[in-house]
Image (cartoon, rainbow, N blue to C red):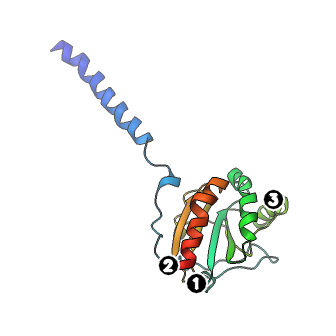
Amino acid sequence: MKRALYILPVAFFAALAFVLFNSLRSPAPNQLPSALIGKPAPRVSLPPLDARALAFAPEDLSSGHVTVLNVWASWCVPCREEAPMLAALARDPDVRLYGLVYKDTPARARAFLAESGNPFARIDLDRDGRAGIEWGVYDVPETFVIDGHGIVRARHSGPLTEQVMTEELLPAIAAARQS
């Protein structure tokens, strides 16, 4: 009986440690599927970044062209890393590249764009993150591909790299053009 009193707490601790360790291996946010895939893009109206930027409206996401929406912030280090990929994507005449500034200020976002370049045709400001909730944003950067009918066709969480562009984003854009 005395032996069980010593073994029981050790066994309980081992079981608890096993459960907690396994919870650390749950999918990262960039591996979770988006609930928006195959559904209409959220109908959220936001103000433009500032007086120099054009805003996009929900109707702009379903006006017949493929749209790539990039959710970013000035405080986001990976957003700086993906700037060259966004600049390359902006040169595609068949794609509209829109930006959604997430939980940031216009001054900081504008300084970020001055430093890294502005690839966006239109930029909305989600100052408090409420639109990010509608889009299901886990973290920045996140990129969505929306077809000409306003249906979300793909989502990528994390910075855009050459590999992501080649293996995920460009094929998703091509597929969105066909729908």
Give amino acid for label 1.
Ser
The residue lying toward the viewer, choosing from 33 and 164, is 164
* Disc 2 residue crowd, few under 14, some 14–19, many 20+, Cα 10 Å: some
Residue corresponding to mark 3:
116
Whether residue 134 is situated above or below residue 160 in the rendered picture: below
* Disc 1 residue crowd, few under 14, some 14–19, many 20+, Cα 10 Å: some
At horizontal 63% and vertical 82% (from top left) the residue drawn is 65
Question: Along the horizontal axis of the image, is 128 left or right of 87?
Answer: left
Question: Along the horizontal axis of the image, is 138 left or right of 126?
Answer: left
Residue corresponding to mark 1:
62
Give amino acid for label 3.
Ser
Q: Is residue 91 visible?
A: yes
At horizontal 60% and vertical 80% (from top left) the residue drawn is 61
Give amino acid for label 2.
Pro
Q: Cα distance, mark 3 to mark 1?
A: 29 Å
Q: Is residue 131 visible?
A: no
Query: Where is residue 117 drawn, in percent x and y?
Result: 81, 63
Query: Where is residue 179 drawn, in percent x and y?
Result: 51, 80
At horizontal 47% and vertical 56% (from top left) the residue drawn is 32
Asked whether disc 3 touches disc 2, contact meaning CB atoms under 8 Å apart, the reply is no
Secondary structure at badge 3 equals helix
The residue lying toward the viewer, choosing from 117 and 100, is 117
Secondary structure at badge 1 equals helix
* Disc 3 residue crowd, few under 14, some 14–19, many 20+, Cα 10 Å: some
The residue lying toward the viewer, choosing from 29 and 149, is 149
- The tag earlier along the polypeptide, 2 or 1, is 2
Q: Cα distance, mark 3 to mark 2?
A: 31 Å
Secondary structure at badge 2 equals loop
Count of labels in the image: 3
Q: Which mark is residue 40?
A: 2
